[in-house]
Amino acid sequence: MAQETGLKENQVIQNDPLCSSGEYQKGLDLAENGKLAEALAYFQKYLTSSPKNAEILNDIGAILHCMHRSDEAVEYFLKAKALQPASAEILWNLSETYLASGHAEKAMELFDEMEKLDILNAEVLNRTAEILINAGNLSDADRMLNKSLELSPNQPILHPMIEVVRGKMAANKI
């Protein structure tokens, strides 16, 4: 469950007694055991005493995402990102939530930051391109597929996909 929710047992916010306590671990254990509603309530309770704790905000976002409450999850991830803008985990979770809810353009806004942190990969670019193609945004899909090839050149399936996308773009201009 930890991988699924983005929660990391050993990741601790420095100088925050909650995150270094057994209480924090209890919230993680609840989430890992599939008791998402209980874990959510548990972390929200502690958020009131530590509202600027990026780890708790991220964990709440991850739990909400797993509960298919993506819009709420995004709010928490954005608050966490404001507190820790260079957190790879927070950026990844935010981009995954955007993609899961079909907001590829918003996910794309994070890709430069993700690339700087070396967490942007071909798989996420390909999924973004698929969402963009389905939404009719062929120009951005083309850019994502080309970026994917740049990051991972050994994807022979992408060449015909790029040709199809470009063919559709050309047909739309006629």
Image (spheres, rainbow, N blue to C red):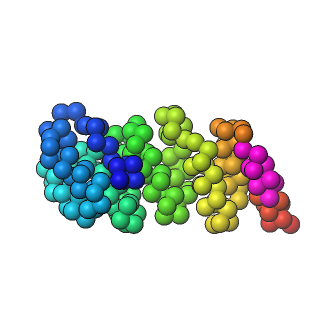
Any part of residue 40 in sight? no
Q: Position of residue 127 (x, y in %)?
A: 60, 55
Instruction: Give the residue at x 76% y 55%.
Output: 161
Residue 60, percent from left and from top? 29, 55
Q: Quadrant of residue 150?
A: top right
Q: Main secondary structure of the magenta part?
A: helix
Question: Does 159 appear in magenta?
Answer: yes
Residue 13 against residue 139 in the figure, above or below: above
Q: Residue furthest front?
A: 33
* Residue in the picture at 51% in, 38% down: 119
Q: Nearer the viewer, residue 132 or 155?
A: 155
Residue located at (32% from left, 43% from top): 8
The residue drawn where x is 56% and y is 57% is 104
Q: Which quadrant of the figure contains the C terminus?
A: bottom right
- Which residue of the protein is positioned furthest toward the right in this rendering? 174
Residue 103 visible in the displayed image: yes
Residue closer to the observer: 172 or 144: 144
| Vertical relation: 150 (above or below) 28 | above
Q: Is residue 130 magenta?
A: no
* In the image: residue 19, left or right of residue 146: left
Pinpoint residue 168: horizontal percent, then vertical percent. 80, 63
User: Residue 21: where, in percent of width, then height?
Assistant: 15, 41
Image: magenta residue range: 155-164
Q: Quadrant of residue 18?
A: top left
